Image (spheres, rainbow, N blue to C red):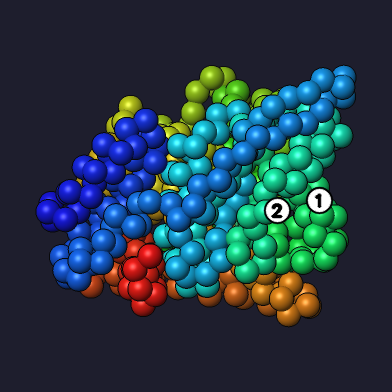
Amino acid sequence: MNAYLERVLAETKAKNANEPLFLQTVEEVLSSVEPLINAHPEYEAASLLERLVEPERVIEFRVVWMDDQLKYHVNRGYRVQFNAALGPYKGGLRFAPNVTLDTMKFLGFEQIFKDALTGLPIGGCKGGSDFDPRGKSDGEVMRFCQAFMTELIRHIGPDVDVPAGDVGVGGREIGYLYGQYRRIKGAAELGAMTGKDIKTGGSILRPEATGYGAVYYLEEVLKHDGLEIAGKKLAISGFGNVAWGIMKKAAELGAAVTYFAGPDGYIHDPEGVVTEEKLNFILEMRAKDPMRCEPYAERFGVEFVPGTKCWDAKDVDVLMPAATQNDVNMEWAKKIAASGVKYYIEVANMPTTNDALVFLKEQKHLLVAPSKAVNACGVSVSELEMAQNSARLYWDAEEVDAKMHKIMTNIYKSSADAAERYGLGYDLVAGANLAGFQKVADAMMCQGIF
Ligand code: 2IT
């Protein structure tokens, strides 16, 4: 490995030894940008890599809120403002009990390159809390969001940092967070948050954007191989917002999600989640707390397999992990390789462990596409929401959808081109890292050293 890269990687590991998720993504990104580092010896003199792996700012704060029994709770809030070379910090908020500073740093680092890949002027960032919205009343969620924003507001703004949703933060939470922002600020700065409900300044298609964009990306991948999406069968994990978008867009284009997994096991529906009735039932299941997919089997008379995942399905064309990080480890990767499936399209942020990713990429019959490219349509439509808010108008679905298409096609093309340019052949994983990295590096080099 390039000596500069090797040194920075070793220093990063030593400095952040207690942050395995962060180190996992740093290692994944840095190990694939070697050709670019070789081509730019000036990066070392500018300490570019050392600067890239160090967040510009890390904010950690106490969040105190009162439950319905008038009992107080203390949670931890975070915002990791990683890199704003390309534009205001942009990234979601995740509310989940397993959120730590490590989770925030891993997601923030990924977000830098994802946001760069969109070609839009946004920097990389992530935030959240170890608050668990599951099992909480509406009032409890509102009070938590208000307490969270009361501190976060010091650090954000339409030109500074623009949060959105992620796991555990949907339209309801964004509404409460933005409401508190407006109350404290005394100004309707709509562009201070995205993922807002369309009734309160949001963009049409934002809820569907991540899932739809993933399918648009898949279409490009298939087109490259002379194939059409119509008739393809997909296995996915998750049935939340993103997974639902995949199901809906796949059905619209004549494909079908025939397997999907939840925390309780997986569903096999040979006909696919393609009818309006089924898609609506998914929405109903999604609103339940806790989320379970077994009711789908009871309602539609299909197979439910408890306690496992569907990554060894043999009768599908495409696998799309769309739930959470490290969903697919080496054990599953071996089953995937043996199943004969041809496309492994990551959707959730970092759904594959590094060893499994390397192994899957080595399989000649398998095409692997990385989440930071595939799921980038969510943050892209967030940026379109910012643009609409700044211009004080709304675009219609046709206009937003056309932009979504263009952005996803560009992401696919720029990734494929970057890999080709650096002699890596058709490698969409390295290509996405190279293309995103180049944009951030160029901007950082333009702005001087700080
Ligand atoms: O992972 C992601 O890209 C998101 N959670 C969306 C971020 C955003 O600002 O819309």
The amino acid type found where label 2 is placed reads Ile
Q: Estimate the x, y position of residue 45 in percent, counting from the top left.
A: 20, 66
Instruction: Report which residue position mark 2 lands on.
Output: 153
Q: How many marks?
A: 2
Residue 69 visible? yes
CB within 8 Å, label 1 to label 2: yes
Would you place residue 388 above or below residue 93 in this image?
A: below
Image point (32%, 33%), residue name: 17
293 lies above or below 29: above
| Quadrant assignment, res 306 | top right
Q: Viewed as shown, does residue 414 lie left or right of 404?
A: left
Q: Position of residue 331 (x, y in %)?
A: 33, 27
Residue 135 in picture, x, y percent from top left: 76, 25
Q: Position of residue 339 (x, y in %)?
A: 34, 36
Going by the numbered disc 1, the residue's amino acid type is Gln
Q: Residue at x 45, y 56 (%)?
A: 56
Residue linked to disc 1: 180
Image point 83% across, 65% down: which residue? Answer: 187
Comes first in the chain, label 1 or label 2:
2
Q: Is residue 293 left or right of residue 233?
A: right
